Image (cartoon, rainbow, N blue to C red):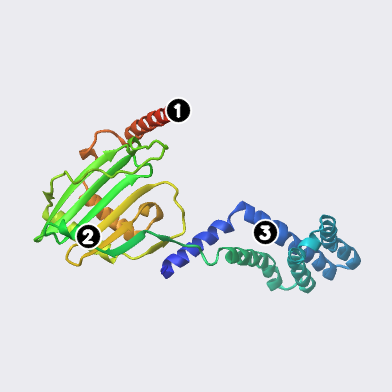
Amino acid sequence: MVETSQFLYQLWRDFSYWFCRIDKLADFAIYIFLPFFWAFVFFSLRKNSPRKKLWLAVALIYPVVLLVGFTISQAIFTNPLHCILIFIPYFVGVALGSLFSVSKNLHWILVPILPLLTYSAVIFWDVYPPVFYPFAEIVDEPMQDVELKIAQNADYEIEMILEDAWWNDTRIIAVRERNDSVFYRAAYRMCSAENIDDEGYKHRIKPNIDSVQWTLLSPEKSLIAKSLKNSIEKYKQEYHSDLVWDGYSVDVSLKDYKRKTSRRLDLSNASILGMQGAMAIEKMMLDLMPPRETFTTLSYDKVSKKCAEIENARIQQIEASRNSK
């Protein structure tokens, strides 16, 4: 369920964005303000001027031109409702222009306010209600007997994977508590592009962490690990309104050996989307995970370049193999 504060914030964000869009302003000027202003000005002149027939004739130019245009384009026959809607601002201008009095201050105030309110109402109609997408994939399920057999008397185990969108730079950390002591192990892998099959598809392979020895965490970081477990257990669905095509990936899994349950979370792009609950989990994960420099001296850009070279060489090898057949 989307929180009220997030709903209102997103509504205001969408409204302010579309309110200032040039194309929306142009549509408003052409389809709403122009017919309204035309009718209002000339019908108010007709009311407050002795040349009533002249101003009436000028005021009728706009609807006549529209009717002729609709008839020539046959729009009046194919989409009559659209044609009728276009005339509504004009008739509103006719009504207000016929009632306008130069001596009344309120009428002068209403002239700029009414088009603005109309435009605001149109934008509000377009953006309400704001669109939200569920963030995070949450999977809760009972643990299998095979998983329970490798518990090694642990109370629980948390595993977290952090990687870029192209699987070039991947870090993994596992945390396990046993007899009130918390242990961790971590690993790193670069260039999943090495794992491209003969069809040209890249396969994701997580770093090999099973061969890494467990290391005892400090008391301070042990508290972070316990808070992390609690946050994962209590994490609830969050919602966002933006789409991120690239970014980064965060996968979290919690195996509670005592309760015999597991929970998996996909928290990709949490900081980009501003997901507070997921960002809190991500921060604790980064506090526990060794720095990237622990695993490699190469910068991310150099790793990406190296991976691209490997990937291109592998693709050329696949193409050469196909051509030789």
Choose top left, top right, bottom left or bottom right for residue 208: top left
What label does residue 325 carry, if any? Answer: 1
The residue at the far front in this view is 325
Where does the N terminus fall, quadrant-wise? bottom left
SS under mark 1? loop
| Residue identified by numbered label 2 | 255
**Where does the image place residue 2, in percent across and percent down from the top left?**
42, 68
Q: Nearer the viewer, residue 102 or 65?
A: 65
Q: Earlier in the sequence, mark 2 or mark 1?
A: 2
Where is residue 272? Give x, y as percent. 39, 52
**Does dot 3 land on a helix, a strand or a loop?**
helix
The three-letter amino acid code for the residue at tag 1 is Lys
Kind of residue at badge 2: Lys
Pick the front one: 178 or 132: 178
**Mark 3 residue type:** Phe
Residue 235 in the image, given as x and y percentages of width and height: 30, 64
Q: Marks 2 and 1, Cα distance to the nearest angstrom?
A: 48 Å
Earlier in the chain: of badge 2 and badge 3, it is 3
Q: Which mark is residue 81?
A: none
Q: Is residue 20 left or right of residue 240?
A: right
Measured in 3D between alpha carbons, the distance from the residue under mark 2 to the one under mark 3, in whole angstroms, is: 56 Å
Nearer to us of marks 3 and 1 is 1
Q: Which mark is on residue 28? A: 3
Q: Is 97 displayed left or right of 198 in the figure? A: right
